[in-house]
Image: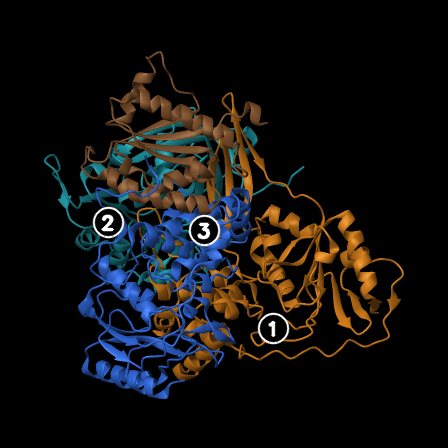
Amino acid sequence: MALENPFVPYLATLKSVMELTPDVKLVGVELEDPAIKAAFDYKPGQFAFLSAFGVGEAPFGIVSLPQRNNSLEFAVRQIGTVTRALHELEPGDTLGVRGPFGNYFPLEEYRGKDMVIIGGGIGMAPLRPVINTILDHRDEYGKLLIINGARTPQDLVFAPEFKTWMEASRTKLELTVDRGDEQWGGRVALVPDVVREVAPSPDNAIAITCGPLIMIRFTLTVLKELGFENHQIVTTLEAKMKCGMGKCARCNLGEKYVCRDGPVFTMEQISQFLEQP
Amino acid sequence: MDLELIQQIRGLCRDLLRNGEINCVIGYERASDGLTARPFFAYEPAAVERLIFDETCTHNLVKYLSDKKGEKIAIVAKPCDSRAINLLLNEGQIKRDTVFIIGVYCPGVVETGWNRKGETLQARCQTCQLLKPVVYDFLAGQAPVRRTEGERYPDILEVESKPEDERRAFWLDHFGPCIRCYACRQICPGCYCPECFVERLDPMWVGIRIAPKENELWQAIRAFHLAGRCIGCNECERACPMDIPLSLLNRKLEKEVKELFDFQAGLSSEEQPPFATFKKEEKLGFEE
Amino acid sequence: MAINYEPKIIGFICNWCSYADADMAGTSPVNYPPNIRIIRVPCSGWVDPLLIAKCFWQGADGVLISGCHPGDCRYNEGNYHARRRFALLHRLLDYLGIAKERLRLEWVSASEGQKFTQIVSDFTRELAELGPRSEG
Amino acid sequence: MNLLMSRDDLIRWLELLLQERTLIAPIRVQGLLLFQPVSKVEDIAFDFDNTTLPPKEWYLPLTETLFSVKSGDGHTELVPATVEREAVIFGVRPCDAKGIAMMDSPFLQEPGDTVYGERRARTALIGLSCKQARPECFCTSMGSAPDDPSNVDILLTEVEDGYIVQAVTDKGKALLPQGLKESKAALPAPPEPQAVPTEGIVQVARKLFDEPYWERLADRCLHCNICAYVCPTCYCFDVRDYPDDGKVERVRSWESCQSPGFTRIAGGYDPRATKGARLRQRFYHKLLYFPEQFQDIACVGCGRCVKACPVNIDIREIINDLQQLGAKSGS
């Protein structure tokens, strides 16, 4: 009897595919083994590797919530060979799942605080379970401000959920795009500029941001202008990874491994690495 | 060590750096063994005192020009190395007016390794007839005595004379130990592709498996991509930690390119390389 | 072993000439042996030497590149470049122990169906006589 | 109590081991000295400085299959690789043995790499003390020694009439033949390798992240993978799928933090895009990140990288330079 090998993924079946943007699909995945499925517990911010056998595997943030969803959901943006292969899969196809890995957003610690969620492009993916957790426990948190930017209106990843988010109590959704189109009546501005304009108060607040690194850097500057301190700013990072277990020595930022010590970090932990050009 | 030559190089580089004509000199300094040489980058006039030149200066520094694009550079170039400059000029990789070439007359370099300096000239130097750089802005040193002309390809003729099966076995034996460290590629002045075929994922030509067949495909195509481009500095073979006789591949192609197309890489920056041109009426002894 | 040995051949066949012959042979009474797997390419000059090498390292016994006669290239000079490239590759492969007989470059026009069939038949026979490669 | 084994005894013992299990030992291959599976005991090199590559490849092979994918009839099965036989590696230098022990830290920490762990459990190490120190050796500065028995199961030290045998672990004791006599002779004094100023290097390194030193040093670096591949403590790897003749395998191979695409993610962003950032990563991992995680400096002083680097990037020189820079920058 071979020991359980952490490099061997769990087999899973693709249950659902939904096109979110021209290059992002929301895939729903169900683990085949019922026992493994029952034991697969995860929290907002954690990630897993998806395998398209014959092509390879890549890490993705889990965008579903165990309380809400029967399947594991991932927002997959087609950008390389693995993601292309994942996009080609159809419901019923077999794929592999390895995880969950990494730490998570300590949402329980944030109870009673105002929440500012700032996401750009596919960076909204790991923030979706954060937003949904807050909405599911709406009374336990203060105000919720969501600032979501994308290149174009078509690239706003979770558009189908905007209505629900907007209608929640004490919740504000600010959308922005880099380039509008004829139907777009909203903002055309960069995310950091919108943060400056909306100017959330840092009092008893936590800001969580995820997106392209350049956006995170500038958003960080604006948040600091607004009075947010490093320990109030939280981000989640992506990195090239091959194991997810702190072994392949690829994702480290200094002595911290994004896969094991992250992907969720406070700015206190990683500002040294973000501030570099 | 030819002190006069070294003073010539240092003086020139000091002036060039002081005048601001260049911002960096790529030359040689003493290695950590106190015996051999290593590449050295001098940015300040005072640093030129570390520059040396002797028979252990085997490195082809032209490799580094690809890292320093857009900067004004002075480079110390032996005759063989200077051919690599022509190669890069011909292929549009560098601009002539951004490089100040300090050519040195070459008495040949010896076999070296860390803490090891051989007595005899490297094999490639023993038959080399190119004593003066093919391109330079300043020529340092004095013309050395012409070496006796020798047979350049005896080892290659020997491999060629083996039967097919034995040739195959010979190469698999030699490629077997390859650990795919890619030192042969990284040290090569002709290997500057932003993405090498060996690392392409789509299509995956070779893949990451480190095994005899993959190694052979890598080595065969690496050599072929340098056909008509390899200038014979043999740095790849020197760098190889597994002692793979890469020169047997590179010089084979050099020999065939000379025979088929009457071409030698890097002798001129203008001449069309063999795969950039053709002759309508040519018999290459292959197709009907 | 050699008795039942069927060599595997990969053919890179130019769309503008030899491919027509290969296509036609399917419906004509004179056919070529089934040992060849044909890959239609836009020009013999399109064929990357890497493809040829990869075929041999994946276990092909022979590779045929067939294009338009010199002077007849649809793109003017593709076949001239192919000729230079494969002349050299031919010598390198031979040196590495993949015998000269295993790689062929042929010029066959669209009207030379007979010639194409003959070439494939001859190539298959010669490879069969040569026997399997010593190492896959 | 140390035992004595004559040269003939050693040969007989190795022959016995060879019958029972896979025996891996230094063998000369085309001018190289490599740890290879032994088919005849007379192929083994007994008198050598050190091998071209460290023995790490027997735990973390250059290339290995992690699992293969078997599919058919709409059913998929993943078949993990298993570990073959019991093995013995003979002729391991104390520095290299320390290298293996250090790889345990990342590989066995939870969740453990099971294949690595199994190989480790099923392999015994027979060490061979060094008779002389080479110019590039500096093991004593890195917490090891030419006669350090700490990380092997059995240590042999050559003396005039054979080898003094130290049975270090129970696994080692069980391997030894019966009836070896007690050694009357004392262990010879070990050779003295060069010293490198490693004292306080972790604290010093922490201060020098932004030093222009790294970009300057990286000017010379070719960013090949030699230093990582000859290093007994480097363990970076890559994982990819191989579709081959309808079979799919997930393969793991060595890779190095020096290779240009190592950290580049799909889409093109690379957190370590410059040569300086990559070279700093190598030395910071050795001198700072690894010690911060697992205590030891990730270098055993074998000197292979010093010897093999084609452009003389010399870790001993770098440690010296950092100490000087650190002293200059104050505390």
Q: Nearer the viewer, residue D14 or B137?
A: B137
Of badges 2 and 3, the one in the foreground is 2
Label 3 packing within 10 angstroms: few (<14), some (14-19), many (20+): many
- Residue D232 lies left or right of residue C71; in this view the side is right
Q: Secondary structure at mark 1?
A: helix
Q: Chain of mark 2?
A: B
**Gap between marks 1 and 3, in whole Å?**
33 Å
Q: Chain of mark 3?
A: A
Visible in this render: residue A246? Answer: no
Q: Which residue is mark 1?
A: D139
Q: Which chain is orange?
A: D
Q: Nearer the viewer, residue B202 or C76?
A: C76
Q: Secondary structure at mark 2?
A: helix
Q: Nearer the viewer, residue A104 or B239?
A: B239
Drawn colour of chain B? blue
**Gap between marks 2 and 3, in whole Å?**
48 Å
Drawn colour of chain A? cyan
At label 3, the amino acid type is Cys
Q: Which residue is mark 2?
A: B276
